[in-house]
Amino acid sequence: MSEAVETAIFDLLAKAAPGKSVSPEDIARAVEPESWRRTLGHVRAVARGLARQGRVVILRHNKPADPDDFKGVYRLRLPDGDGVGGRG
């Protein structure tokens, strides 16, 4: 399932306008439309791994968050062109 979640993350981010973010709910719905809520934890785990690799940025209150130390509502976006999280 990790591959499906990763694919959904990058598919949705590719469709988003530059600098825009996507919600984990949208990602989960893309992977499992009928039982998307059960997929949310897996989306979070995959997002954390991708953020550690610098492939996505996790946003809390529209600011980059530490992938190892964030709680609550979050969104994902692609890193800035310089590879730095920056603002979302």
Image: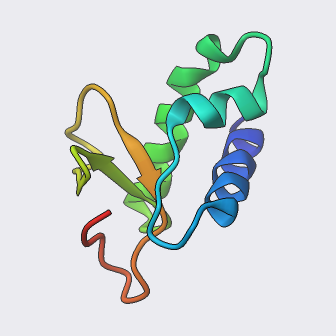
Q: Looking at the image, how many numbered discs can be counted on the residues?
A: 0
Residue visible at 78% across and 20% down in the picture: 33
Instruction: Tell me if 83 is positioned left or right of 29 in this view.
Output: left
- Among all residues in the image, which is located at the extreme bottom? 82
Residue visible at 26% across and 52% down in the picture: 62
* 26 and 48: which is toward the camera: 26
The colour scheme of the drawn protein is: rainbow
Instruction: Tell me if 59 is positioned left or right of 24 in this view.
Output: left
Residue visible at 79% across and 12% down in the picture: 34
Residue visible at 47% across and 61% down in the picture: 20
Specify the quadrant that holds the N terminus. Answer: top right
The image shows residue 23 at horizontal and vertical percentages of: 50, 39
* 40 and 48: which is toward the camera: 40
The image shows residue 8 at horizontal and vertical percentages of: 72, 46
Instruction: Tell me if 21 is positioned left or right of 74 in this view.
Output: right
Specify the quadrant that holds the C terminus. Answer: bottom left
Q: Quadrant of residue 82?
A: bottom left
Q: In which quarter of the image is residue 52?
A: bottom left
Instruction: Tell me if 11 is positioned left or right of 52 in this view.
Output: right
The image shows residue 12 at horizontal and vertical percentages of: 67, 53
